[in-house]
Image: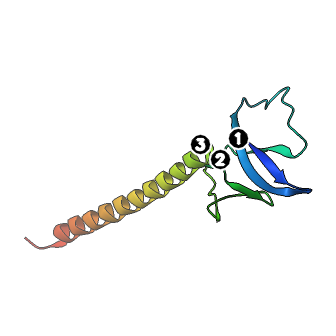
Amino acid sequence: MRKAVILHKGENRSEGEVINIIECTEQGVMGLTLPEEQSLWDCTQYAVSLGDLFKDGVFYHQSEPVKRIPSLEEKLAQVDGKATAEIYDLKSRQEASESAILGLMQMQLNQPM
């Protein structure tokens, strides 16, 4: 888990600059006391860098929003969904091929010799 240390500008706590990134366990950061003008924000699923801006819950790098990195579970679900679609497509093609073969065999059986 990653936490961004954000230095807030004045009284406005909804925006600031990333001044540090802390790696921590799932339990979080225990016993860490930050100055009043700083806060921690979870950035585990974002490729946040020092100097990035934080505004209204969104991280920005060079004025562009930082894209969210899908979790492992989300990636696996996406792969599983694609694999399932491909399996159904292959089954459909197989059924169509088998039907065509059976049709050809039936035509051969019905031809006079």
Residue of label 1: 20
Residue appearing at x 85%, y 58% in the figure: 14
Tell me whether circle 2 and circle 1 mark residues in contact (CB < 8 Å): yes
Instruction: Judge whether residue 45 can be spotted in this image.
Output: yes
Tell me whether circle 3 and circle 2 mark residues in contact (CB < 8 Å): no
Give the label, 1 or 3, closer to the camera. 1
Image position of 45 with respect to 1: above or below: below
Q: Nearer the viewer, residue 4 or 12?
A: 12
Check residue 78 in the rendering and tell me which mark sits there, or answer none: none
Residue of label 3: 72
Crowding at label 1, few (<14), some or many (≥20) Cα neighbours within 10 Å? some
Q: CA distance from mark 2 to mark 1?
A: 6 Å
Image position of 34 with respect to 50: above or below: above
The image quarter containing residue 63 is: bottom right
x then y, percent, for residue 17 = 74, 52
x then y, percent, for residue 26 = 74, 31
The image quarter containing residue 16 is: bottom right
Residue appearing at x 67%, y 54% in the figure: 52
Tell me whether circle 1 and circle 3 mark residues in contact (CB < 8 Å): no
Q: Residue furthest bottom?
A: 112
- Dot 1 falls on a residue whose secondary structure is strand
Residue of label 2: 50
Residue appearing at x 62%, y 45% in the figure: 71
Q: CA distance from mark 3 to mark 2?
A: 25 Å
Q: Nearer the viewer, residue 9 or 92?
A: 9
Which of the marked residues, 3 or 2, is nearer the chain's N terminus?
Answer: 2
Which of the marked residues, 1 or 3, is nearer the chain's N terminus?
Answer: 1
Image position of 24 with respect to 109: above or below: above
